[in-house]
Image (cartoon, grey):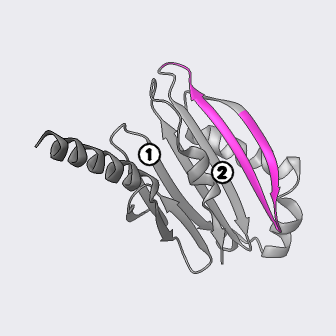
């Protein structure tokens, strides 16, 4: 009987750790896929599509996308301007305006295949919450992946989330 409980315990532990490693691939649109720790909720807010998931530790994973063509930018212009520091700083300024209380601790332009990505990291000075963002420009679409990690939770899955991006 004791052997049965030990076997059951080992099996349950194995299943729970297996479940934590199996992320769910989510089609964001026809061109872009991202994996989440579990099936995300989808909603629309002020014309922006949002996919989000919050885990038991209140770590959140969010993907939004915006058609920059609606703002008069075509894919050729974006492809030319996105790799520039000026364009990066303009987008960073937009994020800073929306994230009162956060200080950006890391910003960089990272080429990724034929695409330009930006990496942003920020910290809430008061609560010490961490915010990680990866932006990806694909044609006229700007995809923004965000992982928010409350203090003092360990940062464990943001890299897995960011590296799960696939362009179809």
| Residue 47 shows in this picture | no
Q: Along the line of sight, which residue is nearer the eye, 99 or 2?
A: 2
Q: Quadrant of residue 69?
A: bottom right
Q: Secondary structure at mark 2?
A: strand
Please state the horizontal and vertical placement of residue 104, each as a whole percent of the image: 67, 31
Instruction: Report whether 125 appears left or right of 18.
Output: right
Please state the horizontal and vertical placement of residue 26, each as a whole percent of the image: 48, 69
Q: Mark 1 sits on what residue?
A: 60
| Residue 25 shows in this picture | yes
Q: Mark 2 sits on what residue?
A: 134
Magenta-span inclusion, residue 64: no
Please state the horizontal and vertical placement of residue 136, each as a whole percent of the image: 70, 60
Residue at the far top: name it: 126
Q: Along the line of sight, which residue is nearer the eye, 64 or 19?
A: 19
Q: Along the line of sight, which residue is nearer the eye, 92 or 165?
A: 165
Q: Secondary structure at mark 1?
A: strand
Instruction: Name the residue: 60% across, 41% down.
Output: 132
Magenta-span inclusion, residue 110: yes
Instruction: Name the residue: 45% across, 23% down.
Output: 152
Task: Check disc 1: other Cα within 10 Å, few if <14, some if 14-19, many if 20+.
Answer: some
Task: Check disc 2: other Cα within 10 Å, few if <14, some if 14-19, many if 20+.
Answer: many
From which residue to which does the magenta span run? Answer: 106-126
């Amino acid at each position: 009987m004791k052997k049965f409980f030990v076997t059951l315990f080992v099996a349950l532990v194995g299943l729970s750790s297996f479940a934590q490693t199996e992320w769910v691939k989510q089609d964001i649109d026809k061109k872009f896929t991202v994996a989440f720790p579990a099936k995300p909720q989808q909603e629309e807010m002020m014309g922006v599509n949002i996919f989000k998931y919050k885990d038991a530790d209140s770590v959140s994973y969010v993907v939004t996308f915006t058609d920059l063509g609606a703002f008069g930018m075509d894919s050729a212009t974006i492809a030319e301007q996105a790799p520039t520091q000026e364009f990066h700083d303009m987008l960073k300024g937009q994020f800073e305006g929306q994230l009162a209380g956060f200080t950006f601790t890391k910003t960089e332009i990272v080429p990724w295949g034929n695409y330009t990505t930006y990496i942003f990291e920020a910290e809430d000075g008061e609560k010490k919450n961490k915010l990680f963002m990866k932006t990806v420009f694909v044609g006229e679409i700007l995809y923004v992946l965000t992982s928010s990690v409350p203090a003092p939770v360990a940062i464990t899955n943001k890299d897995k989330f960011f590296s799960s991006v696939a362009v179809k």
